[in-house]
Image: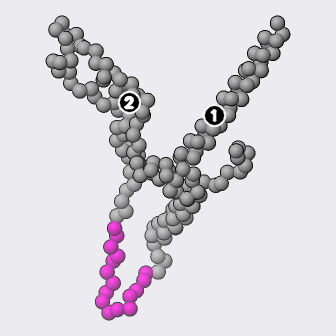
Amino acid sequence: MGWWKKHNPDPLDQRSKALKSQLSSLEDEIRRLQSQVEQPASQPKHRSTVRPQSPPSQRPIAAIPKEPIFEPVDRWQHKPEPPSTAPHFNDLGVRKYDLLATWRRFKAHFRGPSSNNPKLVSYLAAGSINGLRPLRYEKRVARNRFILLSVFFVLILWGILAMIFNQR
């Protein structure tokens, strides 16, 4: 089944490591360039033209905010229930029990939230990313492992019970 063989490296992890190394090299270059800008030149540069030299224009560098910027996340917030109307209450003013709405809430509880990136989900499901197996294959492998382990534990339990009942 391939439980003990070495797994192929994850291409997403490799790409992530490459991007992190590229990012660190760019940050080093930014620091080097900022130190060059902050240090004044030892000798003033003169142009070879006849016109007099004008002072260089200094552009202010945009300040980096010190506090993190958070995006609003609304996927954990529950949707408000629709407003109650007259048909939702009986003659005594007690709310009617809505079996269909209860069933929908029960099904939605097990369905889980929808994905934020459906294109990525479709790529993962179809196996369109090189080096990654499709999700249907991974599900099949996980299902087969579960069935095999279940049968194994049932056989062990059956053996234990057979030993117990044979001793009597």
- Residue 138 coordinates in the image, percent (x, y): 58, 45
Position of 49 relative to 86 (above/below)? below
Q: Quadrant of the N terminus?
A: top right
> Compared to 108, does 31 lie above or below?
below
How far across and how far down the image is residue 25, in percent?
55, 64
Residue linked to disc 1: 146
Does the magenta-highlighted stretch encompass residue 104? no
Rendered residue at 68%/32% (across/down) = 149
**Does dot 1 land on a helix, a strand or a loop?**
helix
**Residue at the (32%, 93%) spot, across then down:** 50
User: Could you tell me the amino acid type at mark 2?
Assistant: Ala
Which residue is denoted by mark 2 in the rendering? 108
**In this view of the protein, which residue sits in the foreground, 143 or 96?**
143
Q: Where does the C terminus fall, quadrant-wise?
A: top right
Q: Looking at the picture, how far across and down is residue 53, in whole percent?
A: 33, 84
When the figure is inspected, residue 122 is found, relative to residue 49, above or below; the finding is: above
| Residue 24 seen | no
Tell me residue 71's x, y (percent). 36, 44
Q: Quadrant of residue 94?
A: top left
- Amino acid carrying label 1: it is Phe
